[in-house]
Amino acid sequence: MVSTQSVGVESGLKYLSESQDALQSRSPNQELLPLTASVKSRDRLEIGGCEVTALVEQFGSPLYILDEETLRAACTQYRDAFKRYYPGSSQVLYASKAWSCLAVCAIAASEGLGIDVVSAGEIHTALQAGVNPDKIYFHGNNKSPEEIQLAVESGCAIVADNWLDLETLAELGKLDVSSKTGGPIRVMVRFTPGIECHTHDYIKTGQIDSKFGFDPNSLDEVFKFISQQPSLFCVGVHAHIGSQIFELQPHDDLADIIIQALTKALSYDLPATEINIGGGLGIRYTEADDPPSIEDWARTICTAVVAACERQQLPLPKLLCEPGRSLVGTACVTAYTVGSKKVIPEIRTYLAVDGGMSDNPRPITYQSVYRVLAASKMSAALTETVTVAGKHCESGDILIKDAKLPNCESGDVLVVPATGAYNYSMASNYNRVPRPAAVLVKNGEVNTIIERETYQDLLRFDRLPVGLRVQK
Ligand SMILES: Cc1ncc(COP(=O)(O)O)c(C=O)c1O
């Protein structure tokens, strides 16, 4: 193994963790690369015991490479930390919007996690992955009646976001739709806690001016309404303050607010025994990012909830959380192949890759900053400053501005770390580019978890009316 200390000049090795041992004790969200990342021979980056360049040769590029060990380590750390620091019962849910696919849902479920879903498509994926519907919570600020019916019939809990949700649920209750699962309709009430946090405006959700959740001032009315619906079983309250958050204080503050909401629900004789404090823990995209560990996040929340319950003299509710990014974000890297190179003397060098905003829309959407490595030149000095551009017809399709790389040419494989969350799940076919494949790696073994789309796939839903057929 090559040591990060062994090289005097700065190289891609600096992104490897110093501590290759004790994989499981490192908090994945504080790392840039998956926990199994290493450079053993030929100066090549390996993930999960597989050389990235060999994976690209076998599966093509761009390629999402998901490291099973890192994903499992994050699941275990969340689950164990909540058990360790919370004396009541707890349940970690995976917010599958981060990456909804069969393999990721199945791995999360096999680690004992439930799943947070926001659409019928995500419900379907979780169910097909074998997730127990008791542990599926259905969110969304504009659920269709059909989606709500599917969730109820499948036995999922519904996170009511607004009055329309409650009215639809009350109607379904009257029709006895829930009888298919044999139980009452489980409802959690989502409200906006009025907490601001430092993150991008697009991913803040806790402030009062938000499209998500009930206004806290309407909670009396909400709980009263539910208490009058015999078919609705209000299991608790929910709040989520935002995403990619590095501060612990907003989550500490949330505990009191959510326990007060729970106390209010109980004052209407509702059988509310659960609170869900959402997700939001940030991850490291660059070395400037310094998020708290999963353990510290969990400890802060558990301690704050216990203290808030003591103040309200309330028995400890079941404590739920629903992280997405910090579970799957660091576990995946995206590999690209370099194509054209455009040198504009004294201005900029563009290195174009075979993907871009269609497989990673975060830079163009949130101005997110990433790092990039040359997969087969890990110890080469970072002598070049280049801009890694996507292949799409948008000047803004830039993956990494002013990246530090060794000299790279057409055919070199580049790796962008921390692309497990909100990448595949937000991917598109812009410019009719097929979405990449995803592989799962572990101990040198590789399995396809998502097939690469074909040109035929792109035309699957196109229809050409007879009159438009071109005569050849
Ligand atoms: C309601 C809700 N819960 C959980 C999450 C997951 O957040 P994160 O991926 O930051 O952990 C989100 C994402 O924005 C969300 O909206």
Image (tube, rainbow, N blue to C red):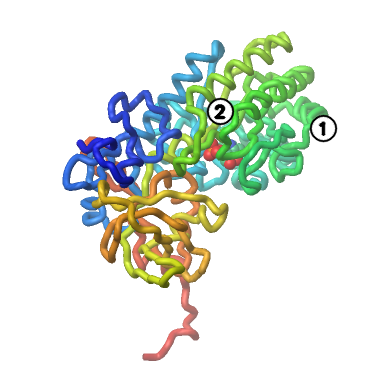
In the image, the residue with mark 1 has its CB under 8 Å from the nearest atom of ligand 1: no
Q: What residue is at 45 percent from the left and 49 percent from the top?
A: 370
Identify the mark at residue 67; answer none if there is no mark.
none
Identify the mark at residue 217; answer none if there is no mark.
1
Give the residue type at disc 2: Cys
Percent across and percent down for residue 366 are 57, 52
Percent across and percent down for residue 347 are 46, 68
Q: What residue is at 74 percent from the left and 34 percent from the top?
A: 194
Percent across and percent down for residue 395 are 51, 68
Q: Using residue 330 as the reference point, say whether residue 414 is left or right of it.
A: left
Residue, disc 2: 321
Q: Label 1: how many residues lie within 10 Å, few (<14), some (14-19) or many (20+)?
A: few
Quarter holding residue 175: top right
Q: Is residue 397 above or below residue 467?
A: above
Q: What residue is at 66 percent from the left and 22 percent from the top?
A: 255
Give the residue type at disc 1: Asn
Which quadrant of the frame does ligand 1 lie within? top right
